[in-house]
Image (cartoon, rainbow, N blue to C red):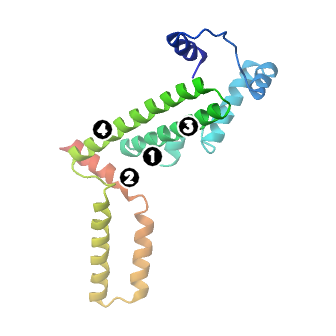
Amino acid sequence: MNNDEFQKADEEAGVETAVVEVMSSAESAVSRTMPADDIISFRRQLIEDYHKGSSGLLDLLHKEGKTDLESRATALLDEMVRETDNLLGNELIATRNGDLRDSTIISFKRIEGLEKTARITQSKQQFEKQSGIDLDSPLMIVIFTYFLAKAKDTFNQMGVGSEINDLFFQKFGEVSEDWKRELREKLEAARVAR
């Protein structure tokens, strides 16, 4: 939240305050000792550290194989929820420091973020219902388990030994590790082909 938003909130509340630019010691040290290019480089490094070695969120999603619309939407929702936790942390720090005005404003911003996340989640669920299949539904586990049990029954009826049975399920687990993303891509391709 920038100082303009705090000033606006103060003006709306009828509070007169002097605007003071506050920086942490790390920020002021960075701004006094680093040229602009170094600050940009430092910022890039912080982003890369935050995203576990990726240059940004998009790069991280690409490296994690989240290239389809569904997995990206889910990852973005997760990022939004993480950011509301960051706001909560800032709110708690402000409260502990006795900055109730700042705490209240941050709390309001957090509520706005949560409301947006809820609306996007509801829209996503509505889209999935309209598209026919909700892969995150607990019923998908029932369906998946049913077919795996039928595969096991088939192996037993064929008289295949436990070694082949175990090998099949081990390999099946490996090749279907990312089954939701792969199935979503196939469903999306089928929808487009209609």
Residue 19 sits in quarter: top right
Instruction: Decide: is 143 above or below 102.
Output: below
> Spatial distance from mark 4 to mark 3, Cα to Cα?
25 Å
Residue at 31% x, 56% y: name it.
137
- The reply to whether dot 1 and dot 4 touch (C-beta < 8 Å) is no
Q: Which one is earlier in the sequence, the residue at label 3 or at label 1? A: 1
Q: Position of residue 49 (x, y in %)?
A: 66, 41
Q: Which residue is mark 4?
A: 123
Q: Which residue is mark 2?
A: 181
Q: Disc 2 marks which amino acid? A: Arg
Q: Position of residue 180 (x, y in %)?
A: 36, 55
Residue at 45% x, 43% y: name it.
75
Q: Which one is earlier in the sequence, the residue at label 2 or at label 3? A: 3
- The reply to whether dot 1 and dot 2 touch (C-beta < 8 Å) is yes
Q: Position of residue 174 (x, y in %)?
A: 45, 67
Q: Is residue 107 left or right of residue 151?
A: right
Q: Residues within 10 Å of mark 3 (few under 14, many from 20)?
A: some
Between 85 and 7, the one nearer to me in the picture: 7
> Spatial distance from mark 3 to mark 1, Cα to Cα?
28 Å
Q: Which residue is mark 1?
A: 66
Q: Which one is earlier in the sequence, the residue at label 1 or at label 4? A: 1
- Helix, strand or loop under label 3: helix
Quadrant where the C terminus is found in the figure: top left
- Helix, strand or loop under label 4: helix
Number of the label disc, if any, that sits on residue 55 = none
Q: Which residue is mark 3?
A: 88
